[in-house]
Image: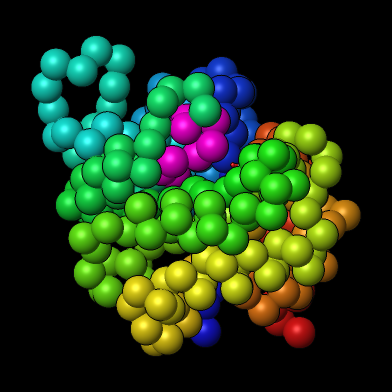
Amino acid sequence: MRKPMMAGNWKMNKSVSEATALAKEIAELTSGYANVDRVICPAFICLPVVQWNLKDSPIQLGAQNCHWEESGAFTGEVSAAMLAGLVDYVIIGHSERRQFFGETDESVNAKIVAALAAGLTPIVCCGESLEQNQAGETQSFVSGQVRGALVGLSAEQVQSLVLAYEPIWAIGTGLAATAQQAGDICGKVVRATVQELYGAAVAGATRVLYGGSTKPGNIAEIMQQADIDGALIGGAALDGKSYAEMVRITSEVYAA
Ligand code: 13P
């Protein structure tokens, strides 16, 4: 059985002191829900102090990006090797990085390889734009992104990572995909692509998250979808109580 995960992507929000306070609040409010993996992804500069403050907590940490090289002349970048020991997860290929920072399927693949080599678990994002959705291109585009991300990876590596389907039109818009739409793409496109490439056992073991306007009010329905194993949460993860509520609801859905 795939363990559910609630991953908070804090994006470019929260100062070091705000991040520390939020992380502590989340640790306290979610302590009763061990059947859910709780992952928070603050900005790079917050990671050391948040890690120190969470050292006795089951909350896991993730970064929001990494570079594909181990070290070198890449001003402003942070390598996966530098993140090792600090975080367990790293978000790779978020649509905001693809849109604003020129990331491509090739660079996403290179970053995944680097993250795995450093012992980190990549949370690999995919998702179509509104135009692609309206043109009926969702399946082919998302499946192509998954294929591009996984080039050259072994079955063992693929089942160790986390995939996240985040339709761009649902991110930060309040317009979440319906639970059924989200479940369909997570199952019939994302997991089905993994199955086509690596077989049913690997596809059955790989966690697939949904992201895009998830909140306490819609998380139960989303988590009831058989092919959705968790959420990558933006805005609602910036509030300790709403994030904790989503963890609680997920815990209940899975305990049922
Ligand atoms: P929202 O939950 O704010 O829509 O953001 C989703 C997201 O981009 C998480 O990575």
Vertical position of residue 12 compared to residue 232: above or below: above
Residue 165, percent from left and from top: 58, 55
Vertical position of residue 200 compared to residue 168: above or below: below
Q: Is residue 30 visible?
A: no
Residue 191, percent from left and from top: 51, 72
Vertical position of residue 18 compared to residue 124: above or below: above
Coloured how?
Answer: rainbow
Q: Residue furthest top?
A: 75
Give the residue displayed 71% in from the left and 81% down from the top.
Answer: 255
In the picture provided, is 138 more to the left or to the right than 130?
Answer: left
Report the front residue among 14 and 171. 171
Q: Residue furthest left?
A: 72
Residue 193, percent from left and from top: 46, 70
Q: Is residue 214 visible?
A: yes
Instruction: Tell me the magenta residue range.
Output: 91-98
> How many dots with numbers?
0
Give the quadrant of residue 32. bottom right
Give the residue displayed 56% in from the left and 18% down from the top.
Answer: 15
Report the front residue among 136 and 162. 136
Give the residue displayed 42% in from the left and 71% down from the top.
Answer: 194
Give the residue displayed 37% in from the left and 43% down from the top.
Answer: 105
Q: Residue furthest right?
A: 217
In the picture provided, is 213 more to the left or to the right than 82?
Answer: right
Is 12 covered by the magenta stretch? no
Report the front residue among 46 and 205. 205
Q: Quadrant of the C terminus?
A: bottom right
Give the quadrant of residue 246. bottom right
Q: Quadrant of ligand 1?
A: top right
